[in-house]
Image (cartoon, rainbow, N blue to C red):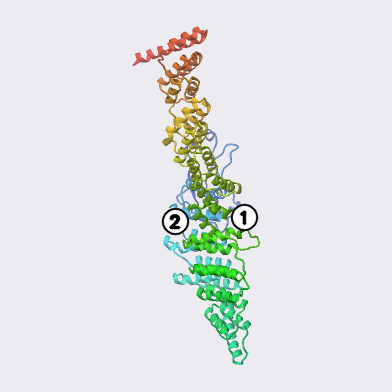
Amino acid sequence: MAFISRSKPYQSKARVYLSLPRSSFFSLPRLFSSIEETQTSGDAKPETQSPDAKPETKNLGSTETRPLRERFQRGKRQNHEKLEDTICRMMDNRAWTTRLQNSIRDLVPEWDHSLVYNVLHGAKKLEHALQFFRWTERSGLIRHDRDTHMKMIKMLGEVQKLNHARCILLDMPEKGVPWDEDMFVVLIESYGKAGIVQESVKIFQKMKDLGVERTIKSYNTLFKVILRRGRYMMAKRYFNKMMDEAEKLFVEMKGNNIEPSVVSYTTMIKGYLSVDRVDDGLRIFEEMRSLGIEPNATTYSTLLPGLCDAGKMVEAKNILKSMMAKHIAPKDNSIFLKLLVSQSKAGDMAAATEVLKAMATLNVPAEAGHYGVLIENQCKASAYNRAIKLLDTLIEKEIILRHQDTLEMEPSAYNPIIEYLCNNGQTAKAEVLFRQLMKRGVQDQDALNNLIRGHAKEGNPDSSYEILKIMSRRGVPRESNAYELLIKSYMSKGEPGDAKTALDSMVEDGHVPDSALFRSVIESLFEDGRVQTASRVMMIMIDKNVGIEENMDLIAKILEALLMRGHVEEALGRIDLLNQNGHTADLDSLLSVLSEKGKTIAALKLLDFGLERDLSLEFSSYDKVLDALLGAGKTLNAYSVLCKIMEKGSSTDWKSSDELIKSLNQEGNTKQADVLSRMIKKGQGIKKQNTASL
């Protein structure tokens, strides 16, 4: 009988779960217990539920109004957790990985929009909710409907992840889901709460372009957004009106033969720039100079940012030259950074470099952030030689280490130049730069991994390992590729022990080396005579189940070497680990070699290991080990092994059994000789009976 979830009795939809397996109805406790229907009292209250929760679909095909409840054994609790709650708990406690995705996929018997909606509603982490939303559709598990889209947009809007919300909204028609006004209203309101009123207006205007009907709802939402920001648009219109009045007053002042001062002109320039009338601001500036009124520092500080914002970089360049000629520094030194960024964005790197010279002329100290802008854009223009010259100045003057500076070098500036230096044989210079940055608290993952790769490529693995230890102390993630290059660098230097140490660190950091890397390290250690060290690396390879089949020849060599050197327990441990991972070592070959070379104790322990675990062994292997034991005078060991073989039911026609019995009698072990003689005769009798029956 199907079990119908009653967690939302007042809704119109209920999810159907799989029926109990047949075996559960015929279990022993079940035969002695009755089935009782759950009686619902008249005054029972349904579960309370969030109004945002998605209703479930009721199974109309079910004829039962109430599910049957199985009587559980004492001490066992029923699990009433809903499927969506289980998924939310899994997402809350685990990182979003492929393994978690597979666990969720295996957990859900049938996907529907109600389940997806409720998972989104119950998710505690927005990142997981967004990844779940995208994964379910990308994996073909479900096609989102209007409600799941709306839920995701609302959640993103609440935490101001507005670009994601906008993309989801605008992609809906491509998925066959039509827009409606409510979705745009949510986005308009979200932008308003984030203080981005311009985007709210754009979304409102875009509704008309996209053919979405705008009703009083969307108009009211936009009005509230505008008013919430202090009548932004009205203030701008008012300022435009005030500028018109100011222009009239300015003309009237000049008509009355009252000459405007530098303050008057600067005020007018500021007003024009405030309403984006940059050309009018420039006109007033030129008029001022034509009348012989010299601009002051405030005038330049007012005009230059407006020119940069308007993209009038030629005019900005000329004004900067005028400032240099008159040796007038601006009131605000941040103007230089704005000039650097704007000239670089315009592609005029020569003009950007002139800004740095202007700072020196005007006695304004250039900070690391200023150099960073130039270095970043020189790298973007592939002008690496110029970037390196700037970097040399930065390093030599130790500008980065000046604690009074406020403009620091950004990752977008130092990462490209560090990467270039590490790829072109100048890792040492890159390290000097980054060590200065580390003194300012920088610990950039990309830069440090590039330093490891650079030193490794240049044949300096010890320097790479030093960087690796710094990253480990500071908790900076190390990349797999950096480890691989470091290990290969140690190998090329003939230092397999250090390569093994680096490989251990790689595994500890959660990276899995590939089969070729494992083989190269193991072979190098083996050839260097470090058999046990090679065995430990081999154990890691077997444990990670990487490249075992293609490296079985190497595994056999190491096992043989361990056994020959007397490291029997270690070898048996490796063989056992192979068996656990579904692979089998060639024990017959190992027993043959050990027997031929007189390593009887090792052969005996290996044979005992195989017998205890019922491993497949050839009869010839038994004979070889027994012959070796008997030849070495270890009759009691041979007796013990032969007894174990016969107890396992493996018949053996070992030709030297009579000789073993004779040796036992000669050594005074008559009891063992008698027992062995009886066992052999019994085995021969059974063999004859089997032959006769055939």
Q: CA distance from mark 1 to mark 2?
A: 47 Å
x and y, in percent, of residue 48 in the image: 59, 54
Q: Within 10 angstroms of label 2, few (less than 14), some, or many (20 or more) residues?
A: some
Q: Residue at x 46, y 35 (%)?
A: 523
Which of the two labelled residues, at mark 1 and mark 2, occupies the earlier sequence position?
A: 2
Disc 1 residue type (three-letter): Gly
Q: Quadrant of the C terminus?
A: top left
Task: Provide the residue designation for mark 1.
Answer: 441
Disc 2 residue type (three-letter): Arg
Task: Provide the residue designation for mark 2.
Answer: 143
Q: Is residue 652 above or below residue 114?
A: above
Instruction: Out of 290 and 207, give the one closest to the viewer.
Output: 290
Numbered disc 1: secondary structure: loop
Numbered disc 2: secondary structure: loop
Q: Within 10 angstroms of label 1, few (less than 14), some, or many (20 or more) residues?
A: few
Q: Is residue 196 visible?
A: no
Q: Quadrant of residue 290?
A: bottom right
Q: Are marks 1 and 2 in contact (CB under 8 Å)?
A: no
Q: Is residue 59 visible?
A: yes
Q: What numbered label is drawn on residue 574?
A: none
Residue, far bottom: 256
Q: Residue at x 41, y 15 (%)?
A: 654
